[in-house]
Each structure stands twice: as structure tokens, then as C-alpha cells.
Amino acid sequence: MKRIFSILKQSAIATTVSVIVSFQMPSAIAGDPFRKTNFRPISDTTESAFEAIFQAGNYQQANRLLKTINSDADPLAYALKGAIAYTEKDWNTLKKTANQPLCQAKEIGETDPLRRDLYLAIGHFLEGSYLYEVEGAFSVFNKLQTVFYYLDLAEKHNPNDPELNLIKGYLDLFLAANLPFFQPENAIARLETHARPAYLVNRGLAIAYRDLETYEKAQTAVEKALKTTPNNPEIHYLKGQILYQLGEEKQSIELVAEAVKHFDSAIARSEQLPDSIRDSYPRERCLAQTLLEELKTAKR
């Protein structure tokens, strides 16, 4: 349970929070990152914060933007704010933020039932994250069941929705990597077939294949993610991890040397990340450098 709530809060929530807003919002400020048609509009501030986190990996910029939102901001803004609060271990802000998506989802009601149920799931997930941190694992079992309940309801409304499939894809991939009765093939197919945006799909696939130790497929996916988000330190770090594992597997000096370069790129931009994310970067860079020296010594 501890691992579920430590990883999912940074993957399923921080990486796959959804868009859900009132239909009264004017289309001039539309910016749905998930859909090419039938989009749901979000504010310019929320769109900029989303891109700052997931395209640039700049949590500080996103946090500054989100501090300007008011009580009637779109729920995606609060989901992003909750994700940042978790990474910064700001439990008071996480507690306050978690209730907002729940309230807004209930107000949406039957006007958009998919988004209503999706945001009920996310709100309960944020509340469960808070409860886990302040009360421990036994307090979150019911919350986790509630999260799955609302995700299943959302899927009944539109099983092909790209936003829903991104969230469920990340969740299913994690479960497949850690529990024997979950099949990773279905989760991977969900991401590849229905989820959007592409840079988060490729990031999720790279994480999945890394955890499944299928490093060549992970390398292909992370290179696609890096091509579209070249300045994101988290993607450089992920590629460094994958190349390190692949280089160790193949005893390849070239792959491990490239891994070191990507760790260096991640570290160079790491000031824009929360401490909880960037703390492991120097240690893993050191491991890669040590392996590189060992491989060079063995070749002499």
C-alpha cells in the first residue's frame, strides 16, 4: 500500500490529472491538452501550468501560476496544485486542495457525467494521499476502492476518452508491474490506442517498459518523449535510467556514457524541480559513472 500511494501520486495524479470545466466558459480561452475534437476548455493560466509541469518540467513556474487562481478556477488547476503540494510535502495545502475537485465534480452532475466521475476519482485520490501521509496505510483502503469505483463509472460513459485512458493506463501499468494478476499488455494497448497527449503516453510507456525490464522498448518510447519535450529534466533523467540499465545489460560503454550525459542534463535543470524528485539524480549519476569506469577498465 505504501508503494501504491507513493508512486501513483507522482504518476497517476501528477502526470495524468484531467480536464473538467463548466460549459459556460468561453471558447476563446480553450486549451484542452487531451483532445483534438470535442474539447473541454480550460483557462490560459491552467494550460500554462500544465505545460510547465509536463512539457518543461518546471514545477516552480507552475506553482507561481497556480497561486494566482481563485475559488472558481477549473478543477484541473486544483488537481495540478494538489500534485505539486504532494511533491513538496505540503500536507495542509494538499488537504485543502483535495476537496475542491470533489465539490466541482458534484456541481457538474449530469451535464458531463464522464468528467464528473473522473474528477470524483481524482478528488478521492488526493484525499487518500493526504490521509496516508498523516494517518498511515490503514486509513486509505476504502479511499482506494472509491477511486477505482469512480474510474469504472467514468469508463462506462466513454471507454475511448483519451484523458480517462491516460489516467487508467498509468494506473494499470503500475499494477501490472507489481501484481501478478494484472496484464501489462492491456494497459499498454490502452495508452497506445486511446490516450493523449502523445508526450505523456510515450513517457508512461517508457516507465512501464523500464519497470518490466524491457529496456530497448523503453528506450524507443523515451526517445519519442524527449523529442517533443527536450527541455524536461524528468525525461532526461528517465532516459538516463533506461540507458544505464540497457548499458549494464549489454556491457556497453557507449550506452552508459550516454546515460551519464542525460543524468547531467537532468541535474543541470533540476533547480526547477521539487527536492523530492531531484534528490536521487546525483546518486544515480554517480552509479552510472562508476559503471562506466568499470567497463572502461575491463576493456583495457
Image: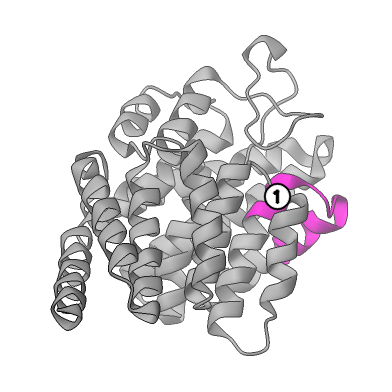
Q: As drawn, is 180 to the left or to the right of 22?
A: left
- At label 1, the amino acid type is Ala
Mark 1: which secondary structure? loop
**What's the magenta region?**
149-166
Which residue is at the front of the view, 163 or 209? 209
**x then y, percent, for residue 200:** 56, 47
Which residue is at the front of the view, 203 or 91? 203
x 43%, y 58%: residue: 10
**x then y, percent, for residue 52:** 41, 32
Which residue appears farthest toward the bottom when viewing the image?
180
Which residue appears farthest toward the top when viewing the image?
28
Which residue appears farthest toward the front when viewing the image?
300
Say if residue 208 shows up in the picture.
no
- Would you identify the image quadrant in which residue 6 lies? bottom left
Decide whether the magenta segment is chiefly helix, strand or loop. helix
**x then y, percent, for residue 228:** 51, 37
Please tell me whether residue 24 belongs to the stretch shown in magenta.
no
x 54%, y 47%: residue: 224
Please tell me whether residue 154 belongs to the stretch shown in magenta.
yes
Q: As drawn, is 175 to the left or to the right of 210?
A: right
Give the labeled residue for mark 1.
195
Which residue is at the front of the view, 228 or 59? 228
x 25%, y 52%: residue: 261
Q: As drawn, is 188 to the left or to the right of 272?
A: right
- Would you identify the image quadrant in which residue 286 lies? bottom left
